[in-house]
């Protein structure tokens, strides 16, 4: 096996990071890149090993990977992760945790290389068929693509496992075997152990045919991306919201294609056709005054004023009450909402009385009179006039003097909080 497959992928001065499990595939890849580096001395190379803690042998595997890299005079870092299955399988949760840990440990200009091969590609295609995936899912794994903002390469996708084993034996490489690979309860292992051997026996070039089908599906998806990008850009607002009324005038096929691409832009996993139908019926076609919410895993779809939004699920801040005892110090807000700072401003807030304590909350109820505005209005009407979506209203810090709402930074000041002399101050919200 030559290194020609690397020449078409790697610049001579690339900074490369290998996801090194210690198994056959990643051992071969790391060894090949070591030889590549010897003929391309400007290349930088290191390894990252993810310790999932799922196997009793996990510590031993980490030691093995460190020892191999020490022998090859390569840097290797062990990344420990906690796998939380939640709504997905252990396989899916481990994969998500692995990629998140790998990308978080990378430097800005580094490329991540993983060792999936041709048989893995075939398995991925069959699993996509099992799920009823469309062309995007059937495109399986590309050799090169961007993930989590990083360049990901899979240089071995054209090689079979049998070829990798022969290469490893030729170069006397040692690797570890994950005992979970023998557990046929996992879908991928079931395919690998029971189904694919029969398919390969019947049709020896089955894996290559699957790879061609995946590539053709990938080409079709790329073509659709090119054809729909301009229209999707025109429908997408600066805040990421999708203006959807035009989608309801299109064919369902075209509308779904645009929705899928918009969802992908949010960094979300692709949803099923049935889920797209629910999104259309329960959110897009809901009555005008409704506030529909449809959950998808750790996110939800919501609509506001003819726009569709894809939002991460967050814990409610309704019960939060944060005292601001010293205005000389910034007040750090929860859930990375930023900080509040106090500045002098003659025409803004009045100074609190001696018996008034300053606090910050995220909920207001009742009827309020705003400074500079005639009459009063319910807080719901205030938010509507300011065009603030419902989910953002409970994430806006509200400043109180005891039980009296005095301001929402940069949005409004109540009459009870308005400055009455030159000794005023204002709240600056740095998001």
Image (cartoon, rainbow, N blue to C red):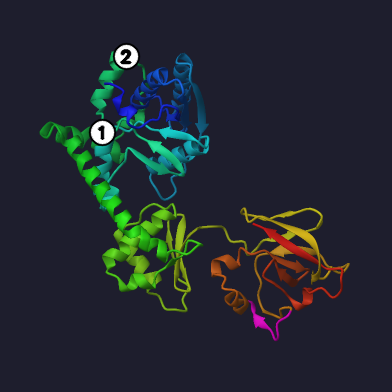
411 over 105 or under it: above or below: below
Task: Name which of mark 2 and mark 1 comes first in the sequence.
Answer: 1
Nearer the observer, 48 or 7: 7
Q: Disc number at residue 118?
A: 1
**Few, some or many residues within 10 Å of mark 1 (<14, 14–19, 20+):** many
Residue 168 drawn at (x, y percent): 31, 18
Residue 275 in sight from this viewpoint:
no
349 sits left or right of 19 in the view: right
Disc 2 from disc 1: Cα separation: 21 Å
Residue 256 in sight from this viewpoint:
yes
SS for dot 2: loop
Q: Disc number at residue 149?
A: none
Q: Residue furthest bottom?
A: 375
Q: Residue furthest left?
A: 202
Q: Which residues are magenta?
A: 372-379
What is the total number of numbered labels drawn onto the structure image? 2
Residue 30 drawn at (x, y percent): 39, 23
Q: Residue at x 35, y 39 (%)?
A: 144
The quarter in which the N terminus is drawn is: top left
191 sits left or right of 309 in the view: left
């Amino acid at each position: 096996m030559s290194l020609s497959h690397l020449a078409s992928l790697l610049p001579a001065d690339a900074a490369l990071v290998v996801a090194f499990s210690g198994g056959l595939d990643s051992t071969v890849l790391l060894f090949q890149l070591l030889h590549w580096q010897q003929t391309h001395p400007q290349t930088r190379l290191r390894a990252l090993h993810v310790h999932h803690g799922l196997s009793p042998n996990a510590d031993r595997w980490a030691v093995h990977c460190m020892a191999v890299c020490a022998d090859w005079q390569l840097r290797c870092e062990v990344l420990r992760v906690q796998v939380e299955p939640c709504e997905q399988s252990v396989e899916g949760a481990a994969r998500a945790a692995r990629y998140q840990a790998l990308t978080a440990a990378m430097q800005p200009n580094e490329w991540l290389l993983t060792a999936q091969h041709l048989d893995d590609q075939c398995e991925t295609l069959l699993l996509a068929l099992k799920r009823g995936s469309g062309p995007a899912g059937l495109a399986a794994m590309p050799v090169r693509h961007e993930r989590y903002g990083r360049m990901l390469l899979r240089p071995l996708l054209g090689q079979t496992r049998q070829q990798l084993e022969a290469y490893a034996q030729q170069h006397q490489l040692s690797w570890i075997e994950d005992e979970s690979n023998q557990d046929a309860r996992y879908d991928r292992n079931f395919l690998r152990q029971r189904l694919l051997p029969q398919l390969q026996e019947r049709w020896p070039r089955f894996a290559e045919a699957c790879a061609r089908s995946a590539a053709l599906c990938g080409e079709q998806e790329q073509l659709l991306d090119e054809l729909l990008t301009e229209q999707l850009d025109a429908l997408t607002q600066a805040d990421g919201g999708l203006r959807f009324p035009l989608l309801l005038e299109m064919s369902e096929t075209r509308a779904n294609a645009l929705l899928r691409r918009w969802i992908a832009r949010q960094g979300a996993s692709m949803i099923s056709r049935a889920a797209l139908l629910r999104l259309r019926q329960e959110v897009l076609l809901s009555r005008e005054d409704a506030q529909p919410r449809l959950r998808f895993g750790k996110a939800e779809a919501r609509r506001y004023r003819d726009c569709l939004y894809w939002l991460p699920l967050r814990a409610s801040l309704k019960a939060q009450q944060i005292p601001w005892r010293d205005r000389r110090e910034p007040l750090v807000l929860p859930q990375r909402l930023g900080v509040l700072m106090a500045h002098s401003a003659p025409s803004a807030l009045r100074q609190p009385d001696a018996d008034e304590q300053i606090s910050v909350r995220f909920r207001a109820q009742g009827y309020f009179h705003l400074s500079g505005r005639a009459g009063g209005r319910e807080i719901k009407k205030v938010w509507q006039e300011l065009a603030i979506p419902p989910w953002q209203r409970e994430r806006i810090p509200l400043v109180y003097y005891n039980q009296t709402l005095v301001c929402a930074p940069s949005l409004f000041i109540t009459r009870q909080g308005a400055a009455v002399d030159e000794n005023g101050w204002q709240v600056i919200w740095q998001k």
